Each structure stands twice: as C-alpha cells, then as structure tokens.
Image: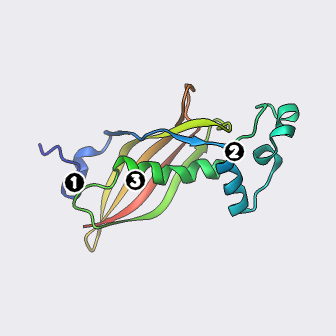
Amino acid sequence: MNTEYHYDNLAQFVGKSLGTSAWATVDQSRINAFADCTEDHQWIHVDPARCQTESPFRTTIAHGFLNLSLLGGLMMKMGVMPSGVRSLVNAGVNNVRFSKPVRAGSQVRARVKVYSVEAKGEGRIMLTLHAELEVEGEAEPALSAECVTFLYP
C-alpha cells in the first residue's frame, strides 16, 4: 500500500487521522478584529469589563464563526492538501456544532481526519474532512465540522 497522502490514493485515508495543527492564540485583539470585520460587536465578545460581572464565562469569548473560520488556515498549515493537487476550493461546511466557548486568550488547534472521498468527474475529487477545534486544557472540542473541498489535480 502506498502510504503517501496523494491525490491518486486518497481513498486509502478515509477514516484516518491527518493529525493536529500547531496552536494558535485567540486573543482579544483577534476577537475585536473579527467583530469589526463582521460588524458583530455583541458585548460578550468585545466588552471585557462587562463580561467580568455579567458573563457566565467571566471573560469575553470568541465568536463561533471566528472559531469556524480559523479551521481553514490551521488545516492548510498542517498540510491537508494532498500532494498531486494543483488547487483546493472550499465547497461548504456540513454539520457544524459549537460545543464549548473559546475564552479570550485561549490556545486552539485543529484535529483532522479524512471523512470521505468522492470522484466528481472532470478530474475533480470532493474531499470531506472531519475537523475539531480543540482548546488547550479542555476535554471537549469547541466545535466540530465537516469541511468539504474540491481538489483539482
């Protein structure tokens, strides 16, 4: 069996782990930048003083969609694009679940496994990866999602 993670043998990797990414910090400046970009300035994300007294988390928490958006970069840095691929195009995200908050200052990383591989004609493969965003020191992931991409050789 060829064990190289390659376009031509992706089916061998269904159900197998691709590993974990490096840790990334979700600090208040990142949360604020996301709030500015999306115009979502809900106090639970951007008002640390109010959160100390009113939030059940006693600190600000990252937007769920910020956490979801971090997966793409974390996965690319860890090498989820197989060799033999000229381009990878996002096709969607299935079954997203936000399980736990990510508190400001937390370290997060992606844990990824190959969920499915389907030939889609014209040389394309639809690769679905099951990803979890882990929070350092937490037993359960902050989120899980199936990230769907089209691969072109």
Task: Give amino acid for label 3.
Answer: Met
Residue ID for mark 1: 6
SS for callout 3 = helix
Report if the CB atoms under discs 1 and 3 are less than 8 Å apart. Answer: no
For the point 68% across and 63% down, which residue is it? 37
**Looking at the figure, which quarter contains the N terminus?**
top left
Q: Image check: 16 left or right of 139?
A: left
The residue mark sitting in front, 3 or 2, is 2
Residue ID for mark 2: 28
SS for callout 1 = loop
Q: Image check: 100 left or right of 77?
A: right
For the point 64% across and 38% down, which residue is it? 102
Residue ID for mark 3: 76
Say the numbered circle drawn on residue 141.
none
SS for callout 2 = helix
Label 2: how many Cα within 10 Å (few below 14, some 14–19, many 20+) = many
Which quadrant of the figure has residue 137? top right
Please, is residue 145 above or below residue 106 in the view?
Answer: below
Query: Of all residues shown, which one is farthest toward the front?
Result: 29
Find residue 2 and report its horizontal and vertical position in percent.
13, 46
